[in-house]
Structure formats: structure tokens, C-alpha cells
Image: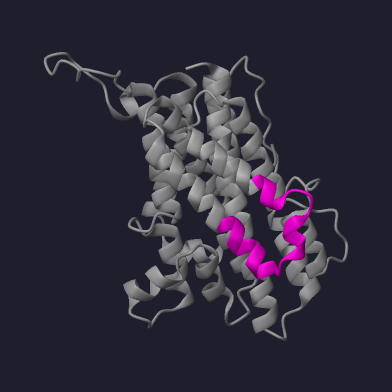
Amino acid sequence: MLSRIAESLYWIGRYLERAEDTSRLLDVHLTLLLEDPVLDEETTSLVLLRVMGIDDEASPDHQTVLRMLGWDETSPTSMVAAFQGARESARRSRETVSLEMWEAINTTWNMMRGNRLQHLPAHRACQLLRERCAVVVGLADSTMSHDEGWHYMMLGRSLERVDMTSRIIESAAYNADSPSAWTQTLRACGAHHAFIRTYRGAATDAQAAEFLLLDRLFPRSLLASLEQAQQALVALETLPRRGRRPDPGLPSQTGLGAVQGRAGEAHRMLGRARAELEYGSLEEMMQTLPERMSQLQRTCSQVNDAVSTHNFDGAGQAVWRAGVR
């Protein structure tokens, strides 16, 4: 596959996931301000913006957060700017993206461009974007061949999900004094219903954190997302060709042994992060949760650099800084 196409598909996955997760984080932030009247709006807004890599806002309020993370097309951290990035990446790879997927992306962009989302209630705007991202991802799943291009998209999506989920958890750790902080965090990750079913309604904040960190059956947990990213890397290095199945008599490599060079380096970094989650002490992890989540975000940035160098060299390599391309 051409490096240009591979890079575009990878970034479609990242941008779609980023747009969806930013809308979730923004929605739950506004809900938290409404449900907890003693919560300091400026402090909470400042923490959220810093978690998202924005440090230059001195006294932010919820309107500032809405602008920076919501509908400002010039703000690189906004959900609208992220979706615009997905559309531009899809436009550059039109020969690979299915017609139905392209039409869904383009239709969604026309629904939100020119600050059109700003005319809707904030909750409805966030919900609309999440639903449209789900439509696009569903069409990609059902109308694209699950070949090399598909795995690039899944790699980008999984890596972005790790990054954004860690930011959501970090935000919850900073707001731990609020009685509804972890409940809202579960909702931000779309995990509240699954969590209630798992723990039968009687659960603690530590169990909520454990669910988002370690539950293998929930697709948005950090552990599940890291596993999916590793599987996508392995698939890209060992993907069989179309047509006949490989001769069973021939030797084949699967897993880490088949992943070489910079791709192997990316795989090892993901594996190390996964092992620290899987085999670490939950009690120790909870004591240093913000620092661990920040470290995981740095790991995602390093993996992105390794993947870009190995797969996209010569195609105008993207730079990843604080979640911004």
C-alpha cells in the first residue's frame, strides 16, 4: 500500500476516535458542573484544559471549554477540528475509502461546519457528533475490505483510544473529591451500563477505575485498547495475501517474533505499557494515577513516532504534540 494512503487511513482512525472521545469528555464535564453545585467551575475547567494539553488559559469558564473543545474550528483540540481532520484524511484516500463511508463523513462535516453545532444545546451537539462517528465507523466496518488499510485505521483508532481514555481517567483523578466524578467518568467512556451489570450496582471508585483500566471485555478499557493496537501492528506485519490461504506446510511467523525494526519497537512499548497495567498493583496505581496516565500518553506519542517512521517515511510524516497533529 502507498505510504500516503496508509498514513491517511491511520489518521482517519485517530481523528474519528478523538472527535468522539472529546465530545464525551466535554459532555460529561458540563454534566459534572450541573450536578455538583459546590464544584469550582474555574478550577475544574482549568484542569480539563490542561489534561487536553492547553496551558495558556488563565481563568477559563465553561464557555471557554465549549469553545476550545467544542466548535471552534481553529482550535486544534476541538471535536469539530478533529472531525475536519478525519474528512481531509478521507479526501486524500478516496480511492481506498468506501463510497458509503465518504458520504457519511462528508454529510457530517456539512452538518457542523461554520459553527452550526453552536446553535444546538451543548449536550445535543455532543450526542450528535458521537452518533455520527458511530455511523462512520460502522460503515467502515461493513463496507471496507479488512485488509492492510483497515488495520492501519484500527491501529490509529486503538492508539487514540488509549490516549483519550487515559486523559478522561486523569481528569477524574484530579476531580476525585466530587462524589459523582467516577460515575461521570464511566459515562464519558460509555462504560456506565456495562459497569453496573458487571458489579451489580454495588461498587466503589476503585472498582470503577479498575474497570476502565483492566476490564478485557469492555472495548474502551485501557487494557483492551492496548491489546487491539498490538494486534493491529502484528496483522500489518504478518497479513496474508488475498486469494488462497498460505500453504500449511510452509513455516510462518506470528506475534512479536514477526514484527521487526521500528514496528517491533512500537510493539514492545505497547507491550510494556500493557504489562505495567496488567501486572501492577491497583492500590499503588490509584495513588499515582495522574502520573501514570501522563506516562501512558507519552508512550502513545512515542508509539506514534515509531509507527510513522516505519510505515509513513517519505509521505510527509505527521507531528503529534498534546493530541494535535
Q: Is residue 198 left or right of residue 78?
A: left
Q: Is residue 245 left or right of residue 256?
A: left
Quadrant (top left/top right/bottom left/bottom right) for the C terminus: top right
125 drawn magenta? yes
Which residue is most to the left?
Answer: 249
> Residue 66 appears in which quarter of the rendering?
bottom right
In depth, the one of 214 and 191 nearer the eye is 191
Q: Position of residue 149 (x, y in %)?
A: 45, 27
Find out whether residue 272 is within the magenta segment: no
Residue 298 visible in this rendered orientation of the protein = no
- Up-down relation of residue 97 to residue 16 (above or below): above
Q: Which residues are magenta?
A: 109-130
Quarter-wise, where is residue 211 in the image? bottom left
Say which residue appears at 50% left-offset and 42% top-offset: 157
Residue 317 visible at all: yes
**Furthest residue in direction bottom, as rendered:** 37
Rendered position, 232 above or below 281:
above
Task: Where is residue 11? Give x, y as percent.
Answer: 58, 34
Q: Residue at x 55, y 47 (%)?
A: 17
The answer to which of 180 and 315 lies nearer the viewer is 315
Q: Nearer the viewer, residue 274 or 220?
A: 220
In the image, residue 120 above or below residue 109: below
Estimate the x, y position of residue 223 in percent, counting from the top left: 41, 51
Residue shown at 47%/27% (left/top)?
Answer: 265
